[in-house]
Each structure stands twice: as structure tokens, then as C-alpha cells.
């Protein structure tokens, strides 16, 4: 028997409490029983997004909500600015290009973040830009964009700001209304630690204005239709939603608010710091060099010379039951990633680092055995994590 641990940046481990909710007998999506839960979950998501804007739950993975964020606000040939700091920035470019938008790309090194001044300059030089699209936490690298500063810039221009917060929401503080974020996207399988298959999207008044003239084709992801159903009494979704996922999300959100959002963010901060400190102690290199640019969701680690990334992930998974992630896109084979999102605590980090240490020893990498896990413990003690 091998006990299994999922330490990827999504999907994340799910608590027993949430799994039990997910296993409840199915209720009908137009029943009063489900309506009550649907209303509650929508309100709790607004609290998590820190917004008074509309928030819709879509039955899709996060990419569906990224697509919804494009097709609902733009028309063929519209100019959009995509700031790409990794694989998911590239995905935004692909979606926009596929729908015939005129994409201006601001490309950064993978491991770096978007420079807010570049966004301001692009908006000054292209007053016809209709939208700015980028990630909050870029899961393929672990870097986090300064969305607060970027939001405060974009709100002075006609363009709307669309933020893919799929892996950052619930791990790091994000303030949709205070920061002027027009469209924010989240997913069920990241910091919420709920089952996969639901995505969320918020829409500001400024974005609804653009929606009035947006002519890109859309049907399933038409947020106008979602809004008309949300305005019914009781509120509903136009199509059959992922009922059991929403029921599970209700519990997952309660658990976050019971812990307290500030404490949830602090937990993510300390857990990711522990991973970073541990791997540096072991002589490994983090991909994101600038500490201030590291998010709290996932740590990307460069694979040492002479060792194959796929050997590390395979041995950890098959022999020790610990699933971590490899690199994506052009970082495939170059990095490994350890996630600390959602239902994850100090001993999960110790298990992951311990499994990494044993695996690297087996692969011939030289370092002092135990140095990583000792650093994890030190991080927790120094940050008073064990008493919080
Ligand atoms: C930042 C970011 N954007 C988009 C996605 C895509 O989400 P999904 O795989 O749920 O479609 C992910 C998933 O890892 C992500 O982390």
C-alpha cells in the first residue's frame, strides 16, 4: 500500500468534509433545495472575489471561463493587449487570436512578471485597445503579477482589465472592486480544494457596457444569458450546472471563511516560503529569482544538470505516492513544480520535500540529506505557523 499525496498546483487535495458533500444524493437544479445552495455559493464567491459585481458559475474548467472572458466583451478585429509571463499568458493569446482579435503581445521571460509601466505605455500608444488580459498567479512559473498596480492604471483608460486568477484566488489577497478589476476568473480545483469542473467569472459595469456591442460568436458561454437566468426568481443557471460540484464548493468556501481569509493567505505564504527555503538549502535553484515576484501557490524548481525532470516526478509518484507537476510549454523537462494550494498543511510540505530528497539521492544529486526538511521546520517555527 502506498499512501497518496497530491502536491500539484491543481487539482488539489480535497478534504473529507468537502468529499462528503460532493457525495450527497443529486438534487435537481431547478429545485428550491438547490436554489438555496446556489444563492449561497454565489454570495460566498463574491466575498472571496471582494466584489459587488455579478459573479457567474460556469460548468467548465478554468479555460472555459477564459474563453468566456474573451467572447463576451470583444468584436472581430478588436485590439487587445495580452501580457504573457508563462504558459497561461500564451493561452490567452491563443484564445484571442482564434477569435480574430488583433493581439498586441507583451512577452516576458518565464519566471518574470509584467511591468506595469509597459502596460501604461502600450495603452498610451494605442488608445484603441479594448482590453488588457493577464494572469494573477502564473501557474506554469509560480510568478505573481502586481494586479493592484495594473488595475489602478487600466481603470483610467477605456480598456477593460481581464484577470485570470485561477491559481491565485484564495491563495493571495485579490481585491476585485478596490483594484478596479473588470473581469476576474477563478476555478474550483485550486485554492478552494473542491472537485474539478466549475469556473467562476465576475463582470463589472464597465465590462457589461462593452458586452452590449461585442459581436464574437458565443452560446454556451454567453454571460448575457447567464445574467438573465441569474435575475430570475429564484436565480438559476441557463444550462444544467455541475450540481454536485456546487454543493461541494459551498462546504469548501465555508471552510475558508471559518479559517478566515487572512489566515488562509498567511498559510499559503508560509507553506510556499517553506518550499522555497527548503529547495534553496538543498542547493536547488528556484525558477523565479526575484523573491518579491514569487506567488504563494506553487514553487518552480530548476532541474539540476544530468537529472531528468520526468525521472523525479515518476519516482516520487510511483515509489513514494507523491504527485508533483513537471514543467509546461517551453519549460517541459526543465523544471518541476510543487503546489501548496488549498487543503494543504505543514506535514504535506514535509512529506513532499522528504520524498524529493530521497528521490534526488537515488538519482545521484549531491546534497546533505535532511537539509530540506530541517529548513521546512525552521520556516514554520520562525513564522510562528505552528501556533497560529
Ligand atoms: C493560471 C491558470 N490559468 C488557466 C488554467 C486553466 O485551467 P483549466 O485547466 O481548469 O482549464 C490554469 C490551470 O492550471 C491556471 O493555473
Image (tube, grey):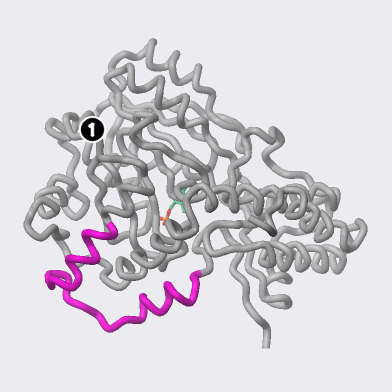
Q: Residue at x 38, y 53 (%)?
A: 62
* Observer able to see residue 75: no
* Screen quadrant of the C terminus: bottom right
Q: In the picture, residue 127 is in which quadrant?
A: top left
Image coords of residue 109 (percent x, y):
61, 32
Residue at screen point 71% across, 48% down: 383
Q: Among all residues in the image, which is located at the extreme top? A: 125
| Residue located beneath label 1 in the image | 207
Residue at (23, 32) in percent of width and height: 207
The residue lying toward the viewer, choosing from 297 and 324, is 297
Q: Is residue 108 above or below residue 221?
A: above
- Specify the principal SS of the magenta part: helix
Q: Nearer the viewer, residue 95 or 291?
A: 291
- Classify residue 375 by image quadrant: bottom right
Observer able to see residue 131: yes
| Callout 1: CB less than 8 Å from ligand 1 | no
Residue 309 left/right relative to 77: right
| Residue ranking furthest to the left | 233
Q: Nearer the viewer, residue 308 or 351?
A: 351
Horizontal arrangement in the rendering, residue 284 relative to residue 50 (left or right): right
**Which x, y percent locates residue 104?**
40, 25
Image mark count: 1
Q: In this view of the protein, which residue sits in the foreground, 382 or 176?
A: 382
Q: Does 362 sit above or below residue 43? A: below
Badge 1: how crowded within 10 Å, few (<14), some, or many (20+)?
Answer: many
Residue 262 on the magenta span: no
Magenta stretch, residue numbers: 14-41
Q: Farthest residue in the bottom direction?
A: 1
Q: Position of residue 266 (x, y in %)?
A: 59, 48
Does the stretch in magenta take in 16?
yes
Secondary structure beneath dot 1 equals helix
Amino acid at each position: 500500500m502506498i499512501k497518496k499525496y497530491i502536491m500539484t498546483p491543481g487539482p488539489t487535495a480535497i478534504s473529507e468534509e468537502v468529499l462528503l458533500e460532493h457525495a450527497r444524493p443529486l438534487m435537481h437544479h431547478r429545485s428550491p433545495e438547490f436554489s438555496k445552495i446556489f444563492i449561497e455559493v454565489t454570495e460566498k464567491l463574491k466575498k472571496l472575489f471582494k466584489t459587488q459585481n455579478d459573479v457567474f458559475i460556469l460548468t467548465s474548467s478554468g479555460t472555459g471561463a477564459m474563453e468566456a472572458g474573451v467572447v463576451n466583451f470583444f468584436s472581430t478585429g478588436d485590439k487587445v493587449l495580452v501580457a504573457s509571463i508563462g504558459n497561461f499568458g500564451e493561452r490567452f493569446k491563443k484564445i484571442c487570436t482564434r477569435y480574430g482579435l488583433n493581439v498586441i503581445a507583451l512577452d516576458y521571460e518565464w519566471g518574470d512578471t509584467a511591468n506595469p509601466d509597459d502596460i501604461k505605455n502600450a495603452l498610451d500608444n494605442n488608445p484603441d485597445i479594448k482590453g488588457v488580459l493577464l494572469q494573477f498567479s502564473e501557474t506554469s512559473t509560480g510568478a505573481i503579477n502586481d494586479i493592484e498596480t495594473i488595475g489602478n492604471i487600466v481603470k483610467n483608460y477605456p480598456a477593460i482589465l481581464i484577470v485570470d486568477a485561477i491559481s491565485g484566488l484564495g491563495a493571495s489577497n485579490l481585491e476585485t472592486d478596490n483594484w478596479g478589476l473588470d473581469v476576474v476568473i477563478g476555478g474550483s480545483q485550486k485554492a478552494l480544494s473542491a472537485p474539478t469542473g466549475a469556473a467562476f467569472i465576475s463582470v463589472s459595469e464597465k465590462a457589461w457596457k462593452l458586452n452590449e456591442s461585442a459581436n464574437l460568436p458565443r452560446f454556451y458561454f454567453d454571460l448575457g444569458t447567464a445574467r438573465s437566468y441569474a435575475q430570475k426568481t429564484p436565480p438559476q443557471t441557463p444550462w444544467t450546472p455541475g450540481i454536485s460540484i456546487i454543493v461541494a464548493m459551498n462546504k469548501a468556501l465555508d471552510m475558508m471563511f471559518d479559517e478566515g481569509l487572512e489566515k488562509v493567505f498567511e498559510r499559503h505564504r508560509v507553506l510556499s516560503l517553506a518550499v522555497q527555503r527548503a529547495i534553496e538549502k538543498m542547493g536547488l535553484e528556484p525558477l523565479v529569482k526575484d523573491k518579491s515576484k514569487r506567488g504563494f501557490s506553487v514553487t518552480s524548481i530548476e532541474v539540476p544538470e544530468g537529472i531528468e525532470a520526468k525521472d523525479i516526478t515518476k519516482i516520487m509518484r510511483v515509489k513514494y505516492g507523491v504527485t508533483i507537476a513537471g514543467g509546461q510549454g517551453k519549460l517541459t523537462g526543465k523544471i518541476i513544480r510543487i503546489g501548496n494550494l488549498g487543503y494543504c498543511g505543514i506535514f504535506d510540505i514535509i512529506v513532499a520535500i522528504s520524498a524529493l530528497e530521497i528521490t534526488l539521492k537515488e538519482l545521484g544529486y549531491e546534497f546533505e540529506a535532511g537539509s530540506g526538511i530541517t529548513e521546512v521546520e525552521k520556516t514554520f517555527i520562525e513564522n510562528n505557523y505552528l501556533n497560529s
